[in-house]
Image: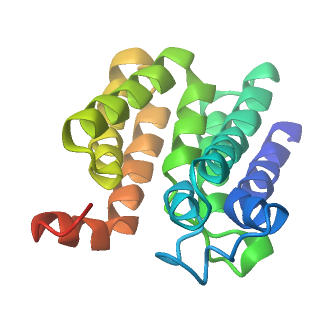
Amino acid sequence: MMDWLLVPLAYLTGSVSSAIIVCKMMGLADPRENGSGNPGATNVMRIGGKKAAAITLLGDALKGLLPVLLAKALAVDSMVLSMVVFAAFLGHLYPIFFEFKGGKGVATSLGVTLGVAWLLGLVVAATWFVVYKIGRISSLAALVAATLTPLYVWLIVGDVKLIITFTVISLILLWRHKSNIQRLLAGQES
């Protein structure tokens, strides 16, 4: 019973918007009202530069990582772990503290992969890095990494519940990036 309390805790942790907090603390414009309007690290970079973006990225990854590490430390079963993973991710997308208007979930999904297995997170991050180095387009790197994550979960972790969870997360990431996909197909994404 106590294990299941980790699920709402993970959602609440995911609901803390690093982008909004970083922008407020650094005296920058609200990312929901500037740039792309997305409260995420890429938009924070547009608004406030690399330092603000790096802090946002770290914050978003940590809010995915920490609830998963706590769940693992408490040795929860894979169903609860899967729910904690999904809740932290969902909290970022639909944060209760910010009118349910969150980011796209890339950094938080990286955080939960790192929490599930360090090797998994490193392989996902390496995929993003390689694709970004080749194409120089962050959204393309995120889409490729998201698409491959369920395969990596299958190969590295092998737990069916986590494979299903990360498949759903990947589909949501693709859906949240639909405008980026349209710009990529039109050759207009940078």
Q: Residue at x 69, y 45 (%)?
A: 55
Residue at 75%, 48% (x, y): give it: 10
How many marks can you see? Answer: 0
Vertical comparison of 122 with 101: above or below: above
Q: Position of residue 146 (x, y in %)?
A: 35, 44
User: Where is residue 49 shown, x and y percent of the image?
Assistant: 58, 55
Residue at 57% across, 48% down: 50
Taking 175 as reference, is 139 above or below it?
above
**Which corner quadrant holds the C terminus?**
bottom left
68 on left or right of 13:
left
* Residue 25 position (above or below residue 161): below
Q: Residue 116's spot in the image, x, y percent?
A: 58, 26
The image quadrant of residue 69 is top right
Task: Give 56 or 178, whichever is nearer the viewer.
Answer: 56
Q: Residue at x 25, y 36 (%)?
A: 131
Locate residue 111: give its quadrant: top right
On-image quarter of the N terminus:
top right
